[in-house]
Image: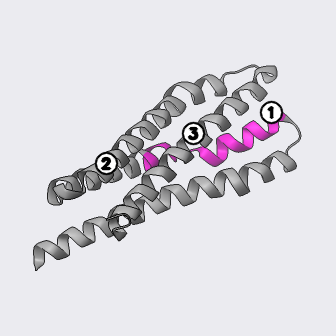
Amino acid sequence: MVWRYTQGMTVVAHLTIAAVWLGSMVYSLMVVQPRVDRFFADHERREEFLVTLANGNRWRVVALIAALVLTDLAILIMRPELRLGYGIALLFYLLAGGLFVHVSWRHWPARVFALPEELPGFQRRLRRLAWTMLVLVGAAFLTTLSVALGVGT
């Protein structure tokens, strides 16, 4: 009885964490970014605002990714019959995490030191990377949600 409860709560925790990451990315890409673009016509001012907005969030996202990977692995251990769905989701999370590492430790620092005329290119690349992460996290979330709900079984 306790074991079954632990398994269920691990699945709920996993789905909640995934929904938080997915929701925050959707909000950023669909609401915040377009409004920032409309508000700041000047690329340098926009960049200054985005740097301020993003400041301090790197390690929160790293913790979120770590929690997703750990809960996914825990579910794989506790419920081996779910290994296909959660294994696929784990791959998606790891790919999205790898992109986040690239953005955080390579793309963003290069962007901060970019010349003003280089900023639009950096912003376009970042948006493409962010949409790719969104698709990966969305696919992982939908996969784990469908497995948790027993869709297709």
Q: What's under tag 3, amino acid-wise?
A: Thr
The residue tagged 3 is 132
Q: Nearer the viewer, mark 1 or mark 3?
A: 3
Residues at circles 1 and 3 in contact by the CB criterion of under 8 Å: no
Question: Which quarter of the picture shows residue 59?
Answer: top left
Specify which label sits upstream in the sequence, 2 or 3: 2
Residue bearing mark 1: 44
Q: Is disc 1 placed on a helix, strand or loop? A: helix
Label count reads 3
For image coordinates 19% across by 76% down, the residue present is 5
Could you tell me how far apart the alpha carbons at marks 1 and 3 are, in whole angstroms?
Answer: 25 Å
Q: Secondary structure at mark 3?
A: helix
* Quadrant hosting residue 1: bottom left
The residue at 80%/53% (across/down) is 35
At 37% from the left and 63% from the top, the residue drawn is 152
Which residue, given by chain and number where applicable, does mark 2 sit on? 69
| Residue toward you, 117 or 88 | 88
Marks 2 & 3, CB-CB < 8 Å contact:
no
Going by the numbered disc 2, the residue's amino acid type is: Val
Q: Residue at x 86, y 50 (%)?
A: 39
The residue range painted magenta reads 43-61
Q: CA distance from mark 1 to mark 2?
A: 36 Å
User: Label 2 to label 3, Cα distance in Å?
Assistant: 18 Å
Helix, strand or loop under label 2: helix
Residues at badges 1 and 2 in contact (C-beta under 8 Å)?
no
In the image, residue 139 lies at what x, y percent? 48, 50
In the rendered image, the quadrant that contains the C terminus is bottom left
Instruction: Using residue 107 as the reference point, say whether residue 118 is left or right of it.
Output: right
- Mark 2 or mark 3, which is nearer to you? 3
Q: Which is nearer the N-term, disc 1 or disc 3?
A: 1
